Image (tube, helix red, strand yellow):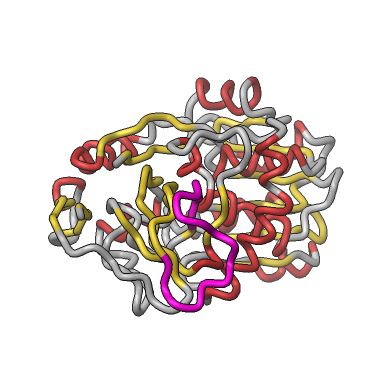
Amino acid sequence: MKAVYISEPGGPEVLEVREVDAPVPGQGEVLIDVVAAGLNRADVQQRRGFYPPPPGASEVPGLEVSGRIAGFGPGVSKPFSLGDKVVALLAGGGYATQVAVPAEQVLRVPEGVDLVTAASLPEVAATVYSNLIMTAQLQPGETVLVHGATGGIGTMAIQLAKAFGAKVATTAGTEEKVSTAKAFLGADIAINYKEEDFPESLRRQNGGKGADVILDVVGAKYLAQNIDALADYGRLVVIGLQGGAKGELDLGLLLKKRAAVVATALRPRPVAEKGAIMTAVRDAVWPLVADGRIRPLVAKTFPLDHVAAAHRYFDSGDHVGKVLLVM
């Protein structure tokens, strides 16, 4: 089979497509013939040498795929059949024509979504739902601030939060992306962070109130501003470190607001936790996709052999929605 390997840490040029042996599904695993795989920021960080796969995971990048069930390992109890159209959440291995994955992390494709587009869903749906709903316990009527409006996480988070009855504010780096966030994704407030101080702009447009929940992919660079932007009893959930890992935290302001800072990662969680999240996604998110309240957004697709070009496009930040590799 074909699979992508990282020859050494670096830019997109270090991604190599190789012919390797196909995986053999182990205990409780299913084998999937991959149709498409989603690109994620974690793949870029792995390529750069900053985010190695968890112990025991494939060194092939790729955290989500769509495809068809091609085989079963021992002990698979989920009701799948050969040829079923599915998506899967992975710890690695998605940039390949086949992948073996624990059955708990596999779901049937939601109704009304084609098999290529479906690859845009599992990682972002699991990340957003687990953090906004399961961790932050976002409630209807609360205000959520989502950073990175037009990326894969942002586009899902805006739509999911709106579907759950929240007021959604978001940040983006161009006026075009600000307009997209409001007109196309349904954000109530969209702030150009290059032109405005986002905590101040949020309060000005939100009746003087900050955010009850902030979903942050930036990390240290935004830490002080995020604390400033929180409302009383607010919850800051950090899920990415694009802006660094170490920052100064004003504990006095955090205490004054009776607020909380939580940091989570999906990739290193145990299979049982990932399985519970995927079950919740199936029950709570898939119906929203099926009835059109959440629309999976694909910016561009690339053949597997053009993986370096796909990463260059992803690194440019020009995309709205997900970038996919098609096998």
Could you say which is closer to the camera, residue 327 or residue 200? 327
User: Magenta region's main secondary structure?
Assistant: loop
Question: Vertical placement of 210 versus 22: above or below?
Answer: above
Work out which quarter of the rendered image holds the N terminus and state it. bottom left
Residue 120 in percent (x, y) is at: 48, 42
Identify which residue is drawn at 84% across, 35% down.
Answer: 207
Q: Which residues are magenta?
A: 72-88
Identify which residue is drawn at 51% across, 53% down.
Answer: 123
**Within the image, what quadrant is residue 58 found in?**
bottom left
Residue 126 in percent (x, y) is at: 58, 56
Lateral position of residue 258 relative to residue 200, left or right: right
Residue 280 in percent (x, y) is at: 69, 59
Residue 174 in percent (x, y) is at: 48, 26
> Do we see residue 265 in this rendering?
no
Identify which residue is drawn at 31% across, 70% down.
Answer: 24
> Do we see residue 251 in this rendering?
yes
Identify which residue is drawn at 50% across, 41% down.
Answer: 118
Lateral position of residue 212 relative to residue 62, left or right: right
Q: Is residue 51 magenta?
A: no
How many numbered badges does the structure rendering display?
Answer: 0
Could you say which is closer to the camera, residue 293 or residue 245? 293
Could you say which is closer to the camera, residue 203 or residue 113? 113
